[in-house]
Image: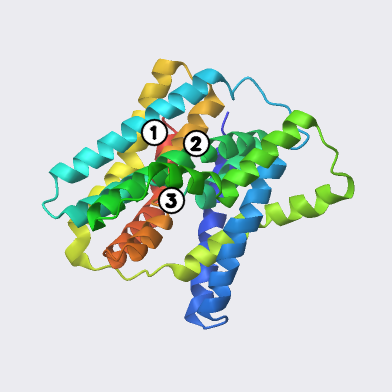
Amino acid sequence: MVNYSQLYLTIINLFCLIFIGFLIRKFNLVDDNTMTGLNKLIFNVFFPLKIMMSFYNVEFGNDLNLKYFVYLNVMFLFHIFLTFYFSKITNEDKSVAVLEANAMSRGNFIIMSFPILSVLFGDEGIVMAGAITGISQFFYNFYTVSMYEGLVGENNSKKKLFINVVKTPLMIGLFVGIFLYGTKVNLFFLETPLRSLGDIAGTLALVTMGYGLNFRIDFKEIKSIMKVSIVKLLVLPLTGLFIGKIFGLSEIQKVVALILFGAPTAVNTYVFAKRYKQDDSLAGYYVVSTTILYLFTLLLLIKLI
């Protein structure tokens, strides 16, 4: 059973860390270059280590099974088609449709959800999250890059895109973790420092996220913001929960899937919009609004399990 008191406290702690990051920026305690470098370190080193070490000296339960992987692949594909066509039929502007589709589908799973799963389920939750992160990297990155390249007229080969996805630090962390699990290699004195570095990933990521958020929202975009928030925080997790019941998922499988699909819009949505010279301000509004509303929607959704 989910410990709701523990869950509430964990979510409050997450938002406190985000607020600390906002205060650091407000009082100019560090410069932008420092935070940019720290953010790269978090996603290139600390989070990959977190995923890698979650596989070390653990035993898989019956919850990380073939049925669950089939369910996740079905849900990723279903959500990609759902968000793509919904954004397409509700927007005349193709660039806004691409922005909304990405904001609806990509979740801030690693930053916002890893700490919650760690508290609720310990290493088993992180192992499941690490495996799901690997799957999501393929789906989300192919989906996002393909849409943006179609929007701006680029045409990179699918083979090159596949190689680039496989080479990401998070995927490397996943592969090394699977290797450690399969070979039972003894890391000896390296275990403690590697675990320590991985353990600080979530805390630092939340602080850097708070530092980068702009809490001023343009109310002219409120219709688009609310549309994205409802689909991202309610429609996707509810469809995931409904189909999960059809698959006969266990409690931990349903909770992990719910937290995955109901996570707020990923910060990468803003990054991709900026990279492809689209409306990055609007993308930032999606991140801010869904992050704030996540405090309420997650608690509501967990009670439905």
The answer to whether 113 appears left or right of 295 in the picture is right
Inter-mark Cα distance, 1 to 2? 9 Å
The answer to whether 186 appears left or right of 155 in the picture is right
Mark 1 neighbour density, 10 Å: few (under 14) some (14–19) many (20 or more): some
Task: State if disc 2 and disc 1 touch (CB < 8 Å).
Answer: yes
- Mark closest to the chain's N terminus, 1 or 3: 1
- Mark closest to the chain's N terminus, 1 or 2: 1
Q: Residue furthest bottom?
A: 28
Q: Quadrant of the N terminus?
A: top right
Q: In the rendered image, which quarter is residue 31 located in?
A: bottom right
Residue positioned 35% across, 48% down in the render: 144
Q: Nearer the viewer, mark 1 or mark 3?
A: 1
Q: Secondary structure at mark 3?
A: helix
Given residues 165 and 84, the one toward you in this image is 165
Q: Which amino acid, by three-letter code, is at mark 2?
A: Ile
Image position, residue 220 (x, y; %): 17, 65
In this view, 142 is above or below 270: above
Q: Which amino acid, by three-letter code, is at mark 1?
A: Phe
Q: Which mark is residue 135?
A: 2
Image position, residue 159 (x, y; %): 43, 42
Q: Secondary structure at mark 2?
A: helix
Q: Which residue is mark 3?
A: 295
Image position, residue 141 (x, y; %): 42, 46
Q: Which residue is mark 1?
A: 76
In this view, 67 is above or below 23: above
Residue positioned 21% across, 66% down in the render: 219
Count of numbered circles in the view: 3
